[in-house]
Amino acid sequence: MKISPAKENILKRVRNALSQPVQLPFPNSEGNSSVFRTENESLEIKFAEEFTRLQGKFVFCSSKGELLDTLRALCEHKDWHNVYCQTPALLKQINQDQLNVLNRGTMHEADAAITDCEYLVSRTGTVVLSAAQPSGRALPVYAPVHIIVAYTHQLVFDLKDALNKLKDKYGNDLPSSISFATGPSRTADIEKTLVVGIHGPKEVYVFLVDE
């Protein structure tokens, strides 16, 4: 096929441009540094502000004892009869004699689910979850209410920090699924009206325990 002179001229310019590499005008924009400035306020306060702004419910606990007391009070206030949890560390911590609604039935009958998480991202109020956690993929999105128990050492500023920590933690054996939950499930696809709980829990709680 014969190439027109105009097209040949364009291809010649492209070849010349490729043979003469040009330095990037903004070398620091290639992921070497964070785009967002770290806030002066604590990560706990920043996460709480962003998470509650997205209709999440944040509870700060100064100890594990306060965590248990607050969980019990919440269950009584909400009249929950089946709170499901399948994380061994949490099951050990939350004594069933003290929280007698824990695992009264199956996951499919649960009023609420309690899970752990990988990290909390302060800048966006995001909870990082993965398939490597004992709760698995289904539990955090199946129950109508999701309760997350996290600790202050799991706070990071940005998503990039969370991803770097996941790489350090798992190396080349990353979990098959990593998800980022930012507040309750919601969509505005239906006539541009915001609907909460359409693809997952209607309510999301984060209990942050101070260590």
Image (tube, helix red, strand yellow):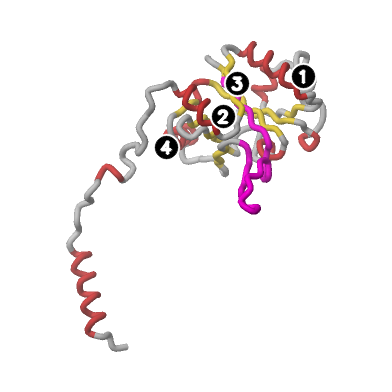
Q: In this view, does 125 lie above or below 176?
A: above
Secondary structure beneath dot 3 equals strand
Secondary structure beneath dot 1 equals helix
Q: Which numbered marker is on residue 59?
A: 3
Secondary structure beneath dot 2 equals helix
Q: Which numbered marker is on residue 76?
A: 1
Residue under the point 79% across and 27% down: 82
Residue under the point 72% across and 16% down: 73
**Which amino acid is tagged 4?**
Lys
Query: What distance separates the C-alpha of mark 4 from that of mark 1?
Result: 39 Å
- Which x, y percent locates residue 97? 78, 14
Residue 185 on the magenta span: yes
**Of labels 2 and 1, the one closer to you:** 2
Q: In which quarter of the image is residue 149?
A: top right
Query: What distance separates the C-alpha of mark 2 from that of mark 4?
Result: 22 Å
First reached walking from the N terminus: tag 2 or tag 1: 2
Q: Mark 4 points at which residue?
A: 160
Query: What distance separates the C-alpha of mark 2 from that of mark 1?
Result: 22 Å
Q: Are the residues tagged 3 and 4 within 8 Å (C-beta)? A: no
**Which amino acid is tagged 2?**
Thr
Residue under the point 22% across and 50% down: 25
Secondary structure beneath dot 4 equals helix
Residue segment shown in magenta:
184-208
First reached walking from the N terminus: tag 2 or tag 4: 2
- Which x, y percent locates residue 20? 17, 62
- Which x, y percent locates residue 205? 63, 28
Q: Mark 2 points at which residue?
A: 52
Q: In the picture provided, is 167 more to the left or to the right than 183?
A: left
First reached walking from the N terminus: tag 3 or tag 4: 3
Q: Which numbered marker is on residue 48?
A: none
